[in-house]
Image (tube, rainbow, N blue to C red):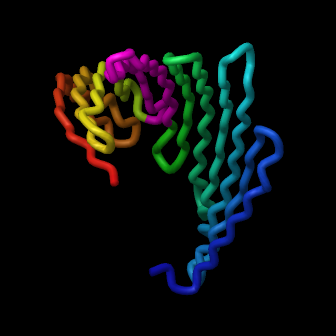
Amino acid sequence: MSGNAIKVAYFLPAMGGLTAGISFADSGNTSGTDTTSYGAHYTMDAGGNKITVGGATSTTEATTTDTDSQNLGIKVVSGNLTVIASQGSFEAVDEDRNGTGLAASYKLANGVTLGAFTMTSEDDSDAGEEYTASGIEAQYVIAAGLTAVVGVTDYEYKLGTDRDTGMSSVSDSGTTTALTIKASF
């Protein structure tokens, strides 16, 4: 599908809790849009807790504005409790998005896992554009490989004002509820 494009990835052998990698994608005959990505994560035990810290960055070259993205996150597992915090950014033509998120889950003795999350994202290129969401979820293992998931998400999206065209703001908000049955073999 990508014609003469070349893609190469190298992952360092795991060293203790450290894993890292780099990838490069040549854009082929349409030079000038090559992509280079780096990523690493480190896992450690601290006082009986398992902590993982990770990050990644990617750049796709362009003749006018490169497309850049960065992500950072931390995950702490303490017994049946898991907490995750993340931060990400994305920059491209007419895009300057930043987002943060926080999530937690707890496994109950009866096979139910309860979870909650909140996140926010805003685009500094489009004045006032913002997306926020928060939700709760319950998972129940019905049988080996079969899980029922019920989730409720409340969201709000503000389109903002596009600085280039002067579009007026349009808002959207609501609540979604979903029941999913997952099967794994």
Q: Residue at x 31, y 36 (%)?
A: 166
Towards the viewer: 149 or 168: 149
Q: Is residue 112 magenta?
A: yes
Residue 72 or residue 41, whichever sits in front:
41
Q: Is residue 176 visible?
A: yes
- Residue that extends furthest to the right in the rendered view of this protein: 15
Give the overall secondary structure of the magenta segment: strand
Q: Residue at x 65, y 46 (%)?
A: 57
Dividing the picture into quadrants, the one containing residue 185 is bottom left
Q: Position of residue 40 (x, y in %)?
A: 71, 44
Q: Nearer the viewer, residue 143 or 65?
A: 143
**Range drawn in magenta:** 97-125
Asked whether, in this view, residue 129 is left or right of residue 86, the answer is left
138 and 159: which one is in front? 138
Query: Tag count in the figure?
Result: 0
Asked if residue 174 lies in the magenta stretch, the reply is no
Relative horizontal placement of residue 167, taking residue 126 as reference (left or right)? left
Say above or below: 107 vs 170.
above
Query: Which residue appears at 18% of the width and 32% of the height?
Result: 178
Left or right position of 172 against 157: left
Q: Position of residue 7 (x, y in %)?
A: 63, 73
